[in-house]
């Protein structure tokens, strides 16, 4: 029987473009939801890579600054279609969100307000919670099979909920499991109880000095929403967003702290009200939350400012993925780096669980939202359905609910 031929390079590029263009228009819910949707598409439906390889990519992108889901899209594009795939996946994932945010920014400047999206978000958020839960369940079944991985995941989940910095937890998880595997290799026949008594306190001791490193932003005031009158050079817009793209770890909430410090308090390009509106735009539009930069760039520099801000904040992600791939390829080659990567994988899953917990508190606010989330989860676990239909259904239910109540 003739073997099935792999797609030719042009066909692979078409696959990459079609997938990430669609996700760019439909991936609501923030980075963790985007990652869950990508897993569904590239692991379960298209089988481009395995769950183990997907987890490795997740762990690697968690160690570098920038928007995680965008970097994952870029990396997946590279693995599928080479350098052209790297560029195409990133552009297709970022482009739709940038265009939508540009339109909203124009409306905001001309009419002074954001569109009402309460009903839209009300119905989508429970579905997003279900999408993340389904992906997390599948990944946990692949990774959390023995005592130490389960123990480490639970400890990191607890520390994350208590407010410990995500990067510290990733590094701590990698070091912890690296030490565990090192001890196991040298003391195969050692007393298990003694090993437990030595290593159980390790995460707490190694991270005890960081209990005050919390990712909470300070309260902000609500000011006017008018377009800024401060003169701003295009080079300054590009450079400051290039800096954000190169140094900001974590979610759009972490970006909020950087934006407020630099753009509101330091440079006075924005008011607090404008900044919160910009973050809101990033939250209820599909695609990367970092397209908040597009909105801000338009406010301070019109269309050229929007394009330069978008280029600045996303450019480092393309560079980082190109640079880190050779290193990532060798991580599984050595026992000690493989153990570190395994620990980082487990930590990444625990952080994903922490985000799911936080999103659940925010999204499941009444009986209807709980029912929506439960039904969506059952459908996802039972049937191989594209999550976009569930998102669309949730949005319609939310809009109708707000209209008739």
Image (cartoon, rainbow, N blue to C red):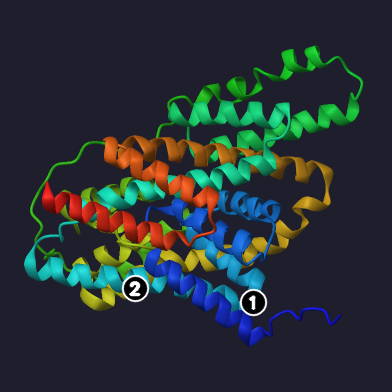
**Residue 184 point in image, percent of width and height:** 84, 28
Residue drawn at point x = 43 percent, y = 26 percent: 212
Answer yes or no: is residue 243 visible: no
Would you call the spot at circle 2 few (<14 residues within 10 Å), some (14-19), or many (20 or more)?
many
Q: Nearer the viewer, residue 163 or 357?
A: 357
**Residue 310 point in image, percent of width and height:** 36, 69
Q: Nearer the viewer, residue 129 or 151?
A: 129
Residue at which label 1 appears? 81
In the picture, residue 21 is in which quadrant? bottom left
Kindly report which numbered mark, 2 or 1, lies closer to the viewer in this rendering: 1
Mark 1, secondary structure of its residue: helix
Query: Which callout, 2 or 1, points at the residue further toward the start of the chain?
Result: 1
Answer yes or no: is residue 254 visible: yes
Apparent side of residue 96 relative to residue 231 in the rendered image (left or right):
right
Mark 2, secondary structure of its residue: helix
Residue drawn at point x = 61 percent, y = 49 percent: 59
Q: CA distance from mark 2 to mark 1?
A: 27 Å
49, above or below 197, in the image:
below
Q: How many marks?
A: 2
* The N terminus lies in quadrant: bottom right
Q: Which mark is residue 237?
A: none
352, above or below 188, in the image:
below
Apparent side of residue 394 relative to residue 344 in the rendered image (left or right):
left
Would you call the spot at circle 1 few (<14 residues within 10 Å), some (14-19), or many (20 or more)?
many
Residue at which label 2 appears? 308
**Residue 386 point in image, percent of width and height:** 48, 62
Apparent side of residue 312 relative to residue 281 in the rendered image (left or right):
right
**Residue 13 point in image, percent of width and height:** 59, 81
Residue drawn at point x = 77 percent, y = 56 percent: 330
2 and 1 marks in contact (CB < 8 Å) = no
């Amino acid at each position: 029987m003739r073997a099935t031929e792999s797609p030719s390079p042009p066909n692979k590029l078409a696959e990459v473009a079609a997938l990430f263009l669609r996700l760019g228009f439909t991936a609501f819910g923030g980075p963790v939801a985007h990652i869950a949707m990508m897993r569904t598409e590239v692991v379960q439906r298209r089988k481009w890579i395995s769950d183990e390889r997907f987890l490795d990519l997740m762990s690697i992108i968690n160690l570098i600054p920038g928007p995680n889901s965008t970097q994952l899209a870029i990396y997946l594009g590279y693995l599928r279609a080479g350098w052209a795939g790297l560029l195409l996946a990133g552009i297709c994932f970022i482009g739709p969100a940038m265009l939508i945010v540009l339109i909203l920014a124009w409306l905001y400047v001309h009419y002074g307000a954001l569109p009402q999206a309460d009903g839209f978000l009300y119905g989508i958020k429970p579905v997003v919670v279900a999408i993340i839960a389904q992906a997390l369940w599948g990944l946990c079944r692949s990774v959390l099979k023995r005592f130490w991985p389960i123990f480490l995941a639970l400890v990191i989940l607890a520390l994350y909920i208590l407010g410990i910095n995500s990067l510290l937890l990733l590094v701590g998880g990698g070091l912890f499991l690296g030490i565990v595997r090192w001890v196991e290799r040298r003391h195969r026949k050692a007393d298990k109880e003694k090993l437990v008594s030595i290593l159980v306190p390790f995460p707490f001791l190694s991270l005890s000095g960081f209990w005050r490193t919390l990712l909470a932003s300070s309260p902000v005031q609500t000011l006017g929403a008018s377009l800024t009158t401060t003169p701003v050079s295009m080079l300054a817009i590009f450079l400051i967003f290039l800096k954000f793209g190169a140094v900001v770890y974590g979610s759009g909430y972490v970006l909020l702290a950087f934006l407020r410090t630099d753009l509101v308090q330091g440079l006075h390009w924005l008011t607090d009200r404008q900044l919160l509106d910009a973050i809101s735009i990033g939250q209820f539009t599909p695609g990367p939350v970092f397209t908040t930069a597009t909105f801000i760039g338009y406010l301070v520099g019109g269309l050229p400012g929007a394009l330069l801000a978008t280029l600045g904040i996303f450019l480092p992600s393309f560079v980082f993925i190109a640079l880190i791939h050779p290193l990532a390829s060798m991580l599984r080659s050595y026992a000690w780096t493989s153990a570190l990567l395994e620990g980082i994988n487990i930590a990444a899953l625990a952080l994903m669980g922490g985000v799911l917990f936080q999103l659940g508190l925010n999204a499941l606010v009444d009986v209807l939202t709980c029912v929506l989330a439960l039904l969506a989860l059952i459908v996802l676990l039972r049937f191989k359905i594209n999550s976009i239909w569930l998102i669309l259904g949730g949005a319609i239910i939310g809009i109708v609910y707000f209209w008739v109540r």
